[in-house]
Structures are given as structure tokens and as C-alpha cells.
Amino acid sequence: MIGKKKNNVLVLGIGNYLMGDEGLGVHVARQLKEELDPEVADLLDGGTAGFQLMEYLEIYPHVILVDATLDSQPAGTIKLIRPRFASDFPKAMSTHEIGLKDLVEGLILLGKMPDIHLFTVSIEKIQPLSIELSWPIHNTLPELKRRIENLARALQPEPVLA
């Protein structure tokens, strides 16, 4: 992907694919890779990569992150957050919370923080050694993907009229 950036928007799915609902972001990134017009956004399955993702985040002006969160909301609740600092991330992010927050701190220190839009989806629990999504999360995917696509389209630069 580096050196092959085609768009101003990166959709980055975060999560551990082998931990059930915690892998939501990865599932979304993989599905959108098949469904989304490639002119709308570049897509990346970020898994649990942490700091290895920094080089991707540095080259995009707009990044749409997708991740699961363990909070008190009903499973499948979608929220859109605009974090500007590591402290803006939800307290109850899933198992890779520290990596994401550290990554944001690093980008801030380097002066390369992109415009981040974070879609979180509330999950009830982490299911170790499962690649299946629970029904509440599975049923949320069409709405989540619709919101991601709409946002990615809205973040596209206006065409220059000659």
C-alpha cells in the first residue's frame, strides 16, 4: 500500500480477527475491500499491528478507523468520535487500546496527525479463538458500512472546475 496511495481517505479496520467481535474492524475492512468503489477510499486490514501502522497514517490526510469497544452500551451501538489526542479515545477500547493511543501520541509528536474519524461499535465480550461475529454485531455491519462509505465520500476533495 505504501507508495500506492490512490485516495485522500484511508479506511483502517483494527482488531484481532481470532477474538470474535473484537475483530469487527478487520471484518469490515475485508468486506469493504470487496464492496466499496476503489475511488472512494483505500482500505487496510490493520489487525493488531500498532506502531507498524504509523507509516500508513502519516501519508493520508483523512483516516477512518473502525474498532470494537467494551463499554456499557448495548452490543451493536455505533458511535463516531473525532479524537485529536490520545486521551480522546474511549476508555474501554478493546484489547489493543494501548497500541492505538501510543500510535496517536507518536503522530502528534511528529506533527503528522491526520484528520481521524473513529467509528466504534460496542461489543458485549471478547470470544477467544473465534472468527465468528455475534448476531448483534453481524446485524450492525450494513449500517456501519453505509456510514463509513458516506463519510469517505464526504471527505473527498471537491473536483476542480476548469
Image (cartoon, helix red, strand yellow):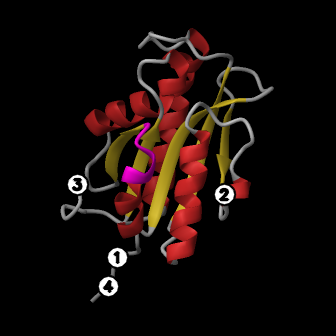
The reply to whether the magenta stretch includes residue 144 is no
Q: What is the quadrant of residue 7 in the picture?
A: bottom left
Foreground disc of the pair 1, 3: 3
Q: Residues within 10 Å of mark 3 (few under 14, many from 20)?
A: few
Could you tell whether 137 is left or right of 61 in the image? Answer: right
Amino acid on which disc 3 is placed = Met
The answer to whether one can see residue 3 in this image is: yes
On the question of residue 147 being in view, the answer is no
**Residue 103 location in percent, x, y?**
52, 56
> Where does the magenta region start and end?
48-52
Residue 159: assigned label: 1
Discs 1, 2 touching: Cβ within 8 Å: no
Q: Is 148 in front, or is 117?
A: 117
Cα–Cα span, label 2 and label 4: 39 Å
Q: Quadrant of the C terminus?
A: bottom left
C-alpha gap between disc 3 and disc 2: 25 Å
Mark sitting earlier along the chain (1/2): 2
Residue drawn 49% across the image and 14% down it = 133
First in sequence, mark 3 or 2: give its number.
3
Q: Could you tell me if the residues under marks 4 and 1 are in contact, i.e. CB atoms within 8 Å? A: yes
Q: Amino acid at mark 2?
A: Ala
Residue 125 place in picture, x, y as percent: 65, 16
Q: Please tell me which of labels 2 and 4 falls first in the chain.
A: 2
Label 2, on which residue? 86
Q: Is residue 49 magenta?
A: yes
